């Protein structure tokens, strides 16, 4: 049976993007939550909880972006001009967040400044990721295999809403991560924040989900036409299961369950995007097959991916295993 290399690569890139969102999402969420934890010691514990893994989590962003450029160069050439501003601001936010993370440990006089830098960098990165997602869902105008839209097409009420949704969702992941990794009053406060951000995340998922089918007839038909509607109904049903798992875990003093339930909300939302998009990689403009590189290029690159992705998964899993368990409030990154 002949392999559909374009479909395989689309799946690999989607997996890399999802891995980035769920892994870097919680440490961005920790930064977003800094203002809600004014005590310096609490902030130290929060940064110690992500210090062993936060930079490794961003490996998936590099893999996803690099893979997109190599395997779907037409998407890279048309989508990036449409999203230059949010992508540049996202990268600047990630850089500033990384600098602030290191510098806050090196000074006492300026620590408050770097704490705010950590928060602002995290919020900008999360917000711009959401805006880029919203702009992509809205659709990007492509004519003659080139971007044909305006500079500000990415900035719309819908993209602002998706930006807010990602910020609140990342804050939920961060709060659930702190519930998993910390103890005492810090954990209790994180649990209260997780309840509030959980309600906010579910509400924003609902608003975005109701708005999306009316943006493009492709989405409406995909979600509501017979017989696809039977399959499409499974996604919100499973979202409801995750929402119950989140509420149950937070109210019953569970530690791992709320984090897994929050991850489930993101994974199912990502699956919902896949249901809406397929077989397009740029909705309404380019299909996966149309945008793919030559078969020989995809086959050559797939050999490297088959080696590289298991290695990344192995060292990522090992890092999380080594640093499993609760954070000692008196030890960590200095």
Image (spheres, rainbow, N blue to C red):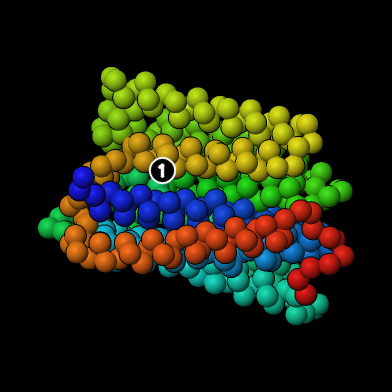
The furthest residue to the front: 1
Count the marks: 1
Is the N terminus in the top left, top right, bottom left or bottom right quadrant? top left
Task: Give the residue number, with chain letter if any, for mark 1.
Answer: 158
Percent from the top left, x then y, of residue 4? 23, 49
In the image, taking residue 154 as reference, residue 95 lies left or right, namely right
Q: Is residue 275 left or right of residue 253?
A: left
Q: Is residue 174 left or right of residue 22?
A: right
Residue drawn where x is 75% and y is 80% of the image: 106
User: Which one is in front, 14 or 286?
Assistant: 14
Dividing the picture into quarters, in which one does residue 225 lie? top left
- Decide: is 8 above or below 205: below
Q: Position of residue 285 (x, y in %)?
A: 21, 48
Reply above or below: 42 against 248: below
Instruction: Please rate how many residues cluster around mark 1, counting C-alpha atoms within 10 Å: few if below 14, some from 14 to 19, many from 20.
Output: many
Residue 89 in view: no
Quadrant where the image shows the C terminus: bottom right
Can you say whether 314 is above or below 248 in the image? below
Residue 133: give x, y in percent of width and height: 41, 50
Residue 204: x %, y % from top left: 53, 37
Q: As displayed, is residue 185 above or below residue 300? A: above
**Residue under the image location 38 percent in, 54 percent down:** 12
Query: Disc 1 on helix, strand or loop?
Result: helix
Query: Which residue appears farthest toward the left when viewing the image?
Result: 144
Task: Name the residue located 62 percent from the left edge and 53 percent from the top edge.
Answer: 26
Along the viewing direction, whichever of 300 and 266 lies nearer the viewer: 300
Residue sitting at x 57%, y 64%: 315
Q: Quick check: can you spot residue 292?
A: yes
Question: Hey, which quadrant is residue 57 in on the image?
Answer: bottom right
């Amino acid at each position: 049976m002949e392999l559909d290399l374009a479909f395989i690569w689309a799946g690999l890139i989607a997996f890399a993007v999802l891995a980035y969102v769920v892994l870097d999402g919680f440490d961005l969420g920790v930064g977003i939550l800094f203002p809600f934890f004014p005590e310096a010691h609490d902030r130290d514990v929060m940064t110690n909880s992500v210090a062993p893994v936060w930079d490794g989590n961003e490996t998936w962003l590099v893999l996803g972006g690099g893979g997109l450029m190599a395997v779907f160069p037409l998407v890279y050439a048309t989508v990036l001009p449409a999203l230059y501003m949010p992508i540049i601001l996202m990268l600047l936010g990630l850089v500033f967040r990384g600098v602030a993370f290191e510098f806050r440990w090196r000074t006492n006089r300026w620590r408050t400044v770097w704490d705010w830098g950590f928060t602002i960098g995290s919020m900008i990165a999360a917000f711009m990721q959401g805006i880029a997602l919203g702009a992509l869902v809205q659709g990007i105008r492509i004519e003659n295999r080139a971007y044909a839209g305006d500079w500000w097409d990415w900035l719309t009420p819908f993209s602002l809403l998706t930006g807010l949704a990602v910020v609140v969702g990342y804050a939920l992941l961060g709060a659930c991560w702190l519930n998993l990794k910390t103890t005492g009053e810090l954990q209790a406060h994180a649990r209260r924040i997780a309840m509030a951000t959980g309600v906010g995340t579910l509400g924003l998922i609902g608003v975005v989900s109701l708005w999306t089918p009316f943006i493009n007839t492709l989405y409406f038909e995909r979600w509501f036409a017979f017989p696809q509607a039977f399959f499409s109904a499974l996604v919100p049903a499973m979202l409801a299961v995750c929402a119950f798992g989140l509420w149950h875990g937070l109210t019953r003093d569970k530690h791992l369950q709320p984090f897994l339930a929050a991850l489930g909300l993101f994974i199912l939302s990502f699956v919902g995007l896949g249901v809406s998009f397929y077989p397009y990689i740029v909705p309404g403009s380019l299909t996966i097959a149309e945008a793919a590189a030559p078969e020989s290029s995809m086959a050559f690159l797939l050999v490297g991916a088959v080696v590289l992705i298991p290695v990344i998964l192995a060292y990522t899993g090992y890092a999380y295993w080594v640093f499993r368990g609760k954070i000692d409030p008196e030890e960590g990154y200095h």
